[in-house]
Image: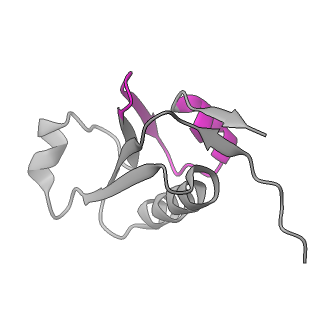
Amino acid sequence: MKKKNVPIVVSESKLVLQLYVSGMSPKSMEAIENINKICSEMLEDSFQLEIVDLYKHPEVASEQQIIFSPSLIKRHPLPKKTLVGTFSDSEKVIRGLGIKIKE
């Protein structure tokens, strides 16, 4: 079986991402799976991903002004970007985060 040509993200510095989920709900699990796939296939080793469960840490929602879950926040490099959803369309996620890709 041939491996698909996956675009690689061009980033001058390591991406710092935070994924905020609400427990083990189906949408949270889908978001975790999709972000892990995007990161491993497109970002290779140029990312740091933190997954925060808002059920276990409800204070974080108000501290970080998280209104919707799942939410993905790109902290670094600036500008900060926030996406909401299950992140099933990897190209939209990469564009939404303002990341350049190399085909």
Q: Residue at x 22, y 56 (%)?
A: 54
Q: Residue at x 37, y 39 (%)?
A: 73
Q: Tell me if residue 31 comes above or below residue 83 in the rendering.
A: below
Q: Does residue 99 appear in this view?
A: yes
- Please give left or right for residue 78 compared with residue 92 in the image: left
Front one among 95 and 12: 12
Q: Percent from the top left, x then y, of residue 102? A: 72, 37
Q: Residue at x 35, y 34 (%)?
A: 76
Q: Residue at x 46, y 62 (%)?
A: 32
Q: Tell me if residue 6 comes above or below residue 30 in the rendering.
A: above
> Quadrant location of residue 72?
top left
- Please give left or right for residue 86 compared with residue 73 in the image: right
Q: Does residue 21 appear in this view?
A: no
- Please give left or right for residue 46 compared with residue 55 in the image: right
**Magenta highlight on residue 85:** yes
Q: Percent from the top left, x then y, of residue 86? A: 52, 52
Q: Residue furthest front?
A: 12
> Quadrant location of residue 3?
bottom right
Q: Percent from the top left, x then y, of residue 57? A: 13, 58
